[in-house]
Image: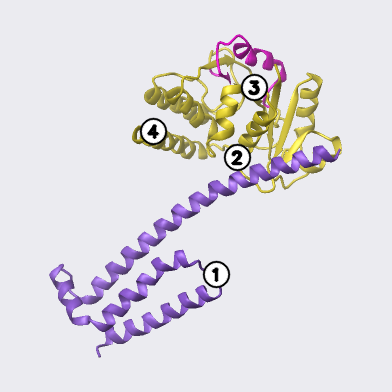
Chain colours: A yellow, B purple
């Protein structure tokens, strides 16, 4: 099975080399989507001759990741994995992540750090955990199914999901919104797999504490709008 | 001529000149100009027929003609603003797709060169 790692990168000069080295060492295909970085990310990519696409303008995380899915679709990959450039995700979990797809148990697999309490995480503040818990409940309310870590950016998609995302992918807060759409409006199966996430080696998270509330409400609104849209069409 | 008629005449002329100049210089498409031309047309109607419009305003419950003009103008601006937002949203989607497709194409070209 052809596996591709989609690595979106926006100003990741401090961590991109380490991340790509770990991927190359594990012998996976990857594509960096350089989302109009204004630091030295591009220079580092060129210097090391990393496989990459330069977006001609900054699109934001949704548009960048979707570009990766389009690339995966055009190049006939069987599995595409979203993999952060900032060192949060660990290549050693990829086998576990793609296992359910290989065994035809799931179409989309989420690497989750909340699925069991022991695999605790360094990645979140209290308010962030609260926000994620809130979203988990919102998705349960609207779809009837529980996802423990709906905002996880560590996901593996099979060919069906790749085709779907290449064609249509939410531009803002893409993970929780697309997870919800798949749960509620498709026959595709989602499975969560416990993973541990690392502390970021460099850079800053794109979600800051006081923005968590704003983000959570935004996702709630998106989910409500999608529900209305789907009902009327 | 009442004051309001003079003001409306001036407003009509200025708006009309601005819209026509933009059209002449091709900085506004004909399709988009039509909704904007409604505004000077309404102003002109007020300048030419103030009395029947005042009667209409009173009948609709407005105390003065000027209040009626405000309401109609604001309503028209809301419609224009909303349609602009629709256009911007659509163009945003189109631009996103263009950026993605073009960036992927550039990548493909580079690979072919090697």
Q: Is residue B102 above or below residue B83?
A: above
Mark 4 or 3, closer to the camera: 4
The crowd level at tag 2 (other Cα within 10 Å; few <14, some 14-19, many 20+) is many
Check if mark 1's residue and mark 4's residue have beta carbons within 8 Å: no
| Callout 3 secondary element | loop
**Residue A63, numbered label:** 2
**Region of the chain picked out in magenta, as a range:** A88-114
- Where is residue B102 shown, x and y percent of the image? 68, 45
Residue A197 numbered mark, or none: 3
Question: Residue furthest toward the top?
Answer: A103
Within-10-Å neighbours for mark 3: few <14, some 14–19, many 20+: many
Q: Chain of mark 1?
A: B
Pick whichever of labels 2 and 4 is earlier in the sequence.
Answer: 2
Q: Position of residue B109 (x, y in %)?
A: 78, 42
Percent across and percent down for residue B56 are 16, 72
Q: Residue visible at 37% across and 80% down?
A: B12
Secondary structure at numbered mark 4: helix
Question: Splitting the image into 4 quarters, where does residue A125 fall?
Answer: top right
Give the alpha-carbon distance from disc 3 to disc 2, as whole Å.
24 Å
Find numbered disc 1 in the image and state the secondary structure of the residue it sits on.
loop
Which residue is label 1 attached to?
Answer: B27
Q: Is residue B48 visible?
A: yes
Report the residue marked by disc 4. A230
Q: Secondary structure at mark 2?
A: helix
The quadrant holding residue B8 is: bottom left
Do the dots labelled 4 and 3 sit on one chain? yes
Q: Are marks 2 and 4 on the same chain?
A: yes
**Quadrant in the picture for the N terminus of chain A:** top right
The reply to whether label 1 and label 4 mark residues of one chain is: no
Image position of B37 (left or right of B104): left
For residue A228, side relative to residue A79 (left or right): left
């Amino acid at each position: 099975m052809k596996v591709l790692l989609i690595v979106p990168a926006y100003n990741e000069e401090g961590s991109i080399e380490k991340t790509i080295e770990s991927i190359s060492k594990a012998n996976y295909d990857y594509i960096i989507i350089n989302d109009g970085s204004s630091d030295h990310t591009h220079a580092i990519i060129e210097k090391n001759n990393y496989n990459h696409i330069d977006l001609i303008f900054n699109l934001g995380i949704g548009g960048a990741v979707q570009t990766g899915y389009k690339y995966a679709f055009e190049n006939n990959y069987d599995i595409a994995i979203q993999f952060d450039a900032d060192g949060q995700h660990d290549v050693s979990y990829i086998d576990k992540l793609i296992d359910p797809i290989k065994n035809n148990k799931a179409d989309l697999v989420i690497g989750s750090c909340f699925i069991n309490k022991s695999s605790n995480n360094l990645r979140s503040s209290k308010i962030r955990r609260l926000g994620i818990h809130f979203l988990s409940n919102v998705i349960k309310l609207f779809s009837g199914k529980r996802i423990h870590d709906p905002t996880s950016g560590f996901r593996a998609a099979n060919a069906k999901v790749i085709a779907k995302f290449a064609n249509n992918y939410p531009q803002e807060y893409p993970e929780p919104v697309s997870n919800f759409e798949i749960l509620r409006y498709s026959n595709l199966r989602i499975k969560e797999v416990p993973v541990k996430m690392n502390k970021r080696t460099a850079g800053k998270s794109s979600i800051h504490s006081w923005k968590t509330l704003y983000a959570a409400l935004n996702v709630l609104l998106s989910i409500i709008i999608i529900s209305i849209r789907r009902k009327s069409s | 001529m009442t004051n309001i008629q003079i003001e409306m005449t001036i407003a009509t002329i200025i708006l009309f000149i601005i819209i026509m100049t933009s059209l002449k210089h091709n900085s506004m498409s004909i399709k988009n100009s039509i909704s904007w031309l409604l505004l000077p047309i309404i102003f002109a109607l007020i300048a030419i027929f103030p009395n029947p419009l005042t009667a209409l305003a009173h009948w609709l419950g407005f105390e003065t003609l000027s209040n009626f003009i405000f309401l109609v103008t604001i309503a028209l601006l809301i419609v224009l603003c909303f349609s602009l937002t629709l256009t911007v949203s659509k163009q945003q989607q189109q631009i996103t797709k263009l950026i993605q497709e073009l960036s992927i194409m550039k990548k493909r070209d580079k690979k072919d060169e090697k």
